[in-house]
Amino acid sequence: MTASTLQQVRSIASDIFGVPADKIGAESSPETIENWDSMQHLNLVLAIEEKFGVQLEPEDIEQMKNIGAVAALVERLKSAAR
Amino acid sequence: MSDSISNPTSPARNPSNLREEIDKLIAQGSFDLASRRLAELWRRDPAPATASFVTARLDELREKTRDRLALTKFKLAILRSFTVEPIVPLLRAEAFAYGIDLEVHVGDFNTYVQDLLDGQSSLYRFAPNAVVLAVRTDQAAPELWRDFADLAPAAAQQAAERVARGYEQWIGAFRKHSQAALIVHSLERPSSPGLGVLDGQSEAGQSGLIRQINRELLRIAAGFHGVYGLDYDALVARHGSEHWHDERKWLTARLPIAAAYLLPMAREWMRFIVPLSGRTAKVLVTDLDNTLWGGVIGEDGMAGIKVDAEYPGAAYQALQRALLDLSRKGILLAVCSKNNLDDAMEALEKHPGMLVRARHFAALRINWTDKAQNLREIAQELNVGIDALAFLDDNPFEREQVRGALPEVTVIDLPKNPLEYAAALRNCAAFERLTLSAEDQQRTEMYAAQKQRAGAEQNFQSKEDFFRFLEQEAELEPVSELTLARVAQLTQKTNQFNLTTRRYTEPQIAEMAEKPAWHIFSIKVRDRFGDHGLVGVAITHDEGEQCEVDTFLLSCRVIGRTVETALLAHLAESAAQRGCKRLAGWFLPTKKNAPARDFYQEHGFERQETNGAGSLWALDLRSFTLRCPDWIKLKAAAETMPGGKN
């Protein structure tokens, strides 16, 4: 995983969940981020799709258990698209 | 505070630095600048994540300034059959960029019928300014959407009629309970009809019947004041049905629209919200070189500039057609260009490829002065506020300079490619209008006559001589079906000569007109140079022996020509005839209505009281001398009660 993808996902998560980016790490999850509910999860999915120009499958969305997993998923979809 | 003016494209101002700067400005208490930076962030990066940031900071700013941001408040309710929640932050951020503080109420899934019919529903308790009714075809007309081929032709036709009747009942109920504007989504046609190409062979097919319902919806909307159609089917088609839809999100989250199209949906709603909230532009000020034509007239000359029917000149003709369409909607055009006057005028008057000519412009500033100064002068010459101006320029530097110096101006961000210029202008919500009056369509001609009047005024010894020379005729009449839209429009748009600045919708005006104690007058004015149309409104209500002026306003076109005296004298006379002993009215000061400040005092009214909101004035009707000036020929129609309205 490149640092820049994780970086970008962290800054998107910071906007969506209203938490400073430096308080968000790869292991941050709905358990550690108070605002990460199902509606914000949808907002996160949409922001990721819009930002990276990818389309997430329902199975992908279930795997988005923490920020690191989201970044890994984006990496995978981006390399598949190349 | 030196900022973007010095270097608009400085790399230091990327979106992530902007976020830090905004938070710093908020912490320092520089709320106005924070608000401007927040709008800049949204313009640079209008993405879903940014929308969350923008709305969170907007809420913070609102709280910290105790709601004193210079924004227009607007309440929107969305009734829906699908997930719209992720669109709401985008919509609020977009509204913020137009100077609107938007509060949004979202109805429960598929409860729109109950919400509309029940006068006690959360919809009406929210007291919205406008309501969007966004229902998908699968919900509104399930029998036409699925298994259509099973339906006999007569049953299909009946189903289509039933759907339209349903809408008619809901809209009728809505109008009984609320005077808010209603924006009704049209029904989308299926991208793959059940019968394939066969469906397209008949008007009675699946697509044909959905089109029929959509036509009916427009007919129904036209029967009510303040009900508008949003052509959702055309919106989807414009972006491409296969791109617009996301079947995965529909099946898992009831969100039918793909991530990249949530913003276009929000922007389509804005095209209604901007005119409904009065944040429209009245004048488009355009640059010339590389905006109205390709090239620089001072260097390339008449033969060198590009504007004709072929590429690349065609892009500029397309933009000029968009300009002409704006002027047909009553938006004034003006030029602000750094050029030698003679060079520019030769192109404007004589270039064979030009579609807009000098006569289409109400004001011209062709010089080497800074553009912000020229924009101020144009606003003054045309008698409009700075915030009524929109600015079109290919040069990002000029745009940033204007934004920095005059943040109230709507600055249109032209894309790099001239082929996209016309669409950028046509998609700007600041030019949307929901009704069009005869005045709107003739505005350019009226301003041309105004220029002649201004020239004439200078040749007279006294104001009275000039007034006599003008041969003004004023026609006073109670509001009627024909004038309702214009009267409401004037209450929404008039800022300068407006004593109370109360904004009313068409349905609100219609309701007032029904009450016996209320009187709504409109005034039309004509003079030797031309017809001004309907330019003034006065609303009064009788309370016992007192007649109180609720609204008194005059379009800026006729201020200072004693028409206001004629209208006020008529109010006094008619109130006296009804037996009233006093005519009273408030002056409520705003940032813009200084021209009306001394109006009551100058007409013999006595101040009764003053409070934080304004001052109350009254005229004793048992002994008043207020008369219509003898140089105005006044015709007053007898008052009849308008009736038969929805």
Image (spheres, rainbow, N blue to C red):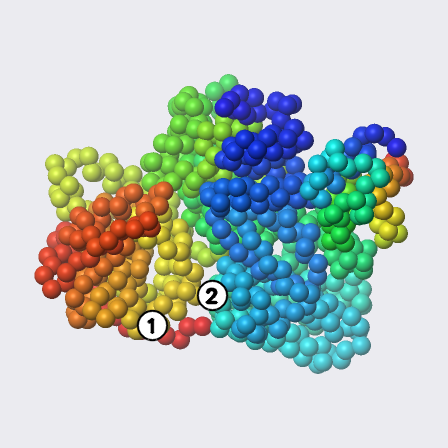
Relative placement, left or right, of B470 versus B255 is: left
Whether residue B568 is visible: yes
Query: Which residue is the site of mark 1?
Result: B515
Circle 1: is it few (<14), some (14-19), or many (20+) Cα within 10 Å? few
Per the image, label 1 sits on a secondary structure element best described as loop
Q: CA distance from mark 1 to mark 2?
A: 16 Å
Q: Are marks 1 and 2 in contact (CB under 8 Å)?
A: no
Question: Which of B249 and B469 lies nearest the eye of the viewer?
Answer: B249
> For residue B61, which numbered disc appears in the image?
none
When asked about the image quadrant of residue A52, the answer is top right
Spot the residue most to the top. Answer: B299
Tell me residue B113's x, y (percent): 62, 72
Question: Which of B22 and B100 lies nearest the eye of the viewer?
Answer: B22
Q: Chain of mark 2?
A: B
Residue plotted at (61% across, 33% down): B23
Query: Which residue is the site of mark 2?
Result: B179
A75 above or below B10? below
Residue plotted at (55% across, 51% down): B102
Q: Chain of mark 1?
A: B
Per the image, label 2 sits on a secondary structure element best described as loop
B430 above or below A23? below
Tell me residue B136's x, y (percent): 69, 64
Residue plotted at (80% across, 64% down): B196
Question: Which of B388 and A66 lies nearest the eye of the viewer?
Answer: A66
Circle 2: is it few (<14), some (14-19), or many (20+) Cα within 10 Å? many
B126 above or below B53? below
Q: Quadrant of the C terminus of chain B?
A: bottom left
What amino acid type is highlighted by mark number 1? Lys
